[in-house]
Amino acid sequence: MIATTTILADVASEVGGKTADVHALLPVGADPHGYELTSDDLRRLTRADLLLINGLGLEQNLSGTMKSAGMDLPLVVTSRSIKTRTMKLDDGHGHASSERHVDHAHNHGKSDPHVWFNPNNVLHWVDVIETELVRHDSSHADIYRRNAEVYRDSLRALDRWIRATVSQIPEERRVIVSDHKLFGYFADEYGFKVVGSVVPGFSSLASPSARAVAKLETTIAEAGVRAILVGQTVNPVLAERIAEDTGAEVVRVYTGSLSSPEEPAATYLDYMRYNVRAITRAAQ
Ligand SMILES: [Zn+2]
């Protein structure tokens, strides 16, 4: 089984345990929004029995490349049952609202794909992965069900830990500015307000106008934002300039990819703890 991002592959390998063979398609440090499949990736996909994707438009180039290569590998959208945040079409500021979508294909680029920033959404991933593993390898169903149950407990413990940790931050400082809009699910769950982003929208591939940058700098000053959260997978240059102009600080976090095993965010649980600690420290 292949999962697109290192984050998704880590969650799948918790459910699969030693019994299922799970690999990440994207390498550590790759930006899932902009990633282009290599010919090596296509070869690996040809040999795979199943491909797990996040969906909601995260893997922007994936299905097009697979289609043009004539591949019809069974593809499982792990975020399919998650209540998604969407960007209103008439709202240039990118405020998002929640609604449940029946057909994600028609909402490409408008749904917020960063569901995993709320561990309660990852519980839904676990349900989908468990169902697929049991379907594909029913002789090990008991093992997959047990692994899934153990991991659900870890996700619930993570949720409790995040609540306790962010409770140290005074309410008026629970504001987030990030490189693109990716903390929406986190903000909704844990009482933060996303006040702006360096590039507009839910993809790191966008770029802002000079007017939008000026507006963001005003927002940062007015809201007293202390940190601009910038993913390890994106270029920090513009964020650094905005930080310099406003006196805020660029804080590097892990966003579209886990870290390498030697670094502090090599599993989804560690990745969330690392990011929440960074957000908490920056706000104090
Ligand atoms: Zn993103």
Image (cartoon, rainbow, N blue to C red):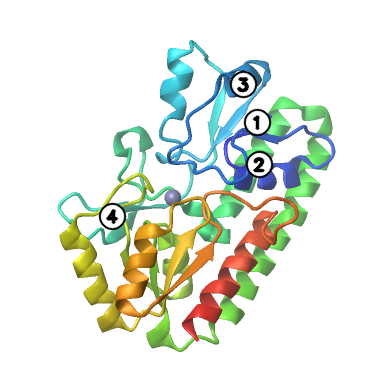
**In the figure, is residue 140 to the left or right of 31?**
right
Asked if residue 16 is positioned above or below residue 90 in the image, the reply reads: above
Report, in whole angstroms, how far the alpha carbon at label 3 lies from the one at label 2.
18 Å
**In front: mark 3 or mark 1?**
3
Nearer-N-terminus badge (3/1)? 1
Residue 120 can be seen, yes or no: yes
Image point 48% across, 13% down: which residue?
69
102 vs 229, nearest the viewer? 229
Which residue bears the numbered disc 4? 200
Checking the image for residue 9, the label placed there is 2
Mark 3 residue type: Asp
Q: Is mark 4 within 8 Å of ligand 1?
A: no
> Residue 94: where, in percent of width, then height?
25, 58
Report, in whole angstroms, how far the alpha carbon at label 2 lies from the one at label 1.
7 Å
Nearer-N-terminus badge (4/1)? 1
35 vs 59, nearest the viewer? 35
Mark 1 residue type: Ile
**In front: mark 3 or mark 4?**
3
Image point 48% across, 35% down: which residue?
35
**Crowdedness near tag 2: few (<14), some (14–19) or many (≥20) residues, C-alpha within 10 Å:** many
Checking the image for residue 2, the label placed there is 1
**In front: mark 4 or mark 2?**
4
Asked if residue 91 is positioned above or below residue 175 in the image, the reply reads: above
Mark 4 residue type: Pro
Rendered image quadrant of residue 157: bottom right
Nearer-N-terminus badge (4/2)? 2
Question: Mark 2 touching mark 1, by CB under 8 A?
Answer: yes
Nearer-N-terminus badge (3/4)? 3
Q: For numbered disc 2, what is the local secondary structure?
A: helix
Which residue bears the numbered disc 3? 40
**In the figure, is residue 52 to the left or right of 68?**
right
